[in-house]
Image (cartoon, helix red, strand yellow):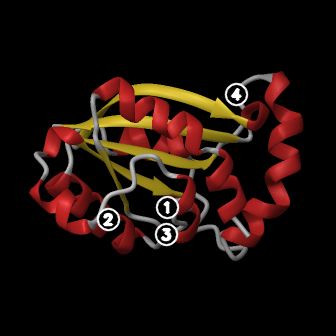
């Protein structure tokens, strides 16, 4: 259900990867990027031999789909394998112009988080809480403000 959104977000993800000089994407899921359209597609073998600064870790919808423990495991693995991680997830509106997109994606967000309040956490709240672990390098909004794409650098 969320895979088509991840597929449509691939061009901005690839743009961010090029901007930081990454040669490979390491997809941590929980929603995986479509590999047939991914120009950075690499085998795990290549990624394991690549220096950390050449790899961009990507995680699509981790705040909506993962528990707190699973999210912490994902972050630990991403920090160990890459200097940068890109998060793609639903976004809460910050300006009036973003409300239509947020309302459009609201049913999908509820379904993705299984109606649980422990899932579906706010991306900005998560970034603030984890500010000691990484710093934000770039933010993009997609689909009129319904999704957020955030690039962070690990400390």
Instruction: Estimate the spatial distance between the alpha carbons at disc 2 and disc 1, rounded to whole Å.
Output: 9 Å
* CB within 8 Å, label 3 to label 1: yes
Residue at (71% x, 59% y) in the render? 4
Judged by depth in the image, the label closer to the viewer, 1 or 4, is 1
At label 2, counting other C-alpha atoms closer than 10 Å, the crowd grade (few under 14, some 14-19, many 20 or more) is some
Residue at label 1? 62
Judged by depth in the image, the label closer to the viewer, 3 or 1, is 3
Residue 125 point in image, percent of width and height: 49, 43
Instruction: Estimate the spatial distance between the alpha carbons at disc 3 and disc 2, rounded to whole Å.
Output: 10 Å
Image-quadrant location for residue 140: top right
Residue at label 3? 30
At label 4, counting other C-alpha atoms closer than 10 Å, the crowd grade (few under 14, some 14-19, many 20 or more) is few
* CB within 8 Å, label 1 to label 4: no
The one nearer the camera, 99 or 142, is 142
* CB within 8 Å, label 3 to label 2: no
Judged by depth in the image, the label closer to the viewer, 4 or 2, is 2
* CB within 8 Å, label 2 to label 1: yes
Residue at label 2? 74
């Amino acid at each position: 259900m969320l895979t088509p959104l991840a597929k449509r977000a691939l061009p901005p993800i690839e743009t961010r990867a090029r901007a930081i000089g990454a040669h490979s994407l390491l997809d941590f899921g929980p929603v995986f990027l479509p590999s047939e359209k991914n120009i950075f597609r690499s085998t795990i073998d290549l990624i394991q031999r690549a220096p950390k600064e050449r790899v961009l870790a990507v995680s699509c919808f981790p705040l909506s789909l993962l528990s707190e423990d699973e999210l912490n495991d994902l972050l630990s693995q991403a920090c160990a394998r890459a200097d940068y991680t890109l998060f793609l997830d639903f976004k809460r509106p910050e300006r009036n112009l973003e409300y239509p997109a947020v309302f459009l994606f609201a049913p999908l967000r509820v379904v993705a988080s299984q109606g649980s309040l422990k899932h579906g956490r706010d991306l900005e709240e998560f970034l603030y809480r984890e500010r000691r672990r990484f710093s934000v390098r770039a933010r993009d909004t997609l689909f009129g403000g319904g999704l957020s794409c955030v690039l962070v650098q690990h400390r």
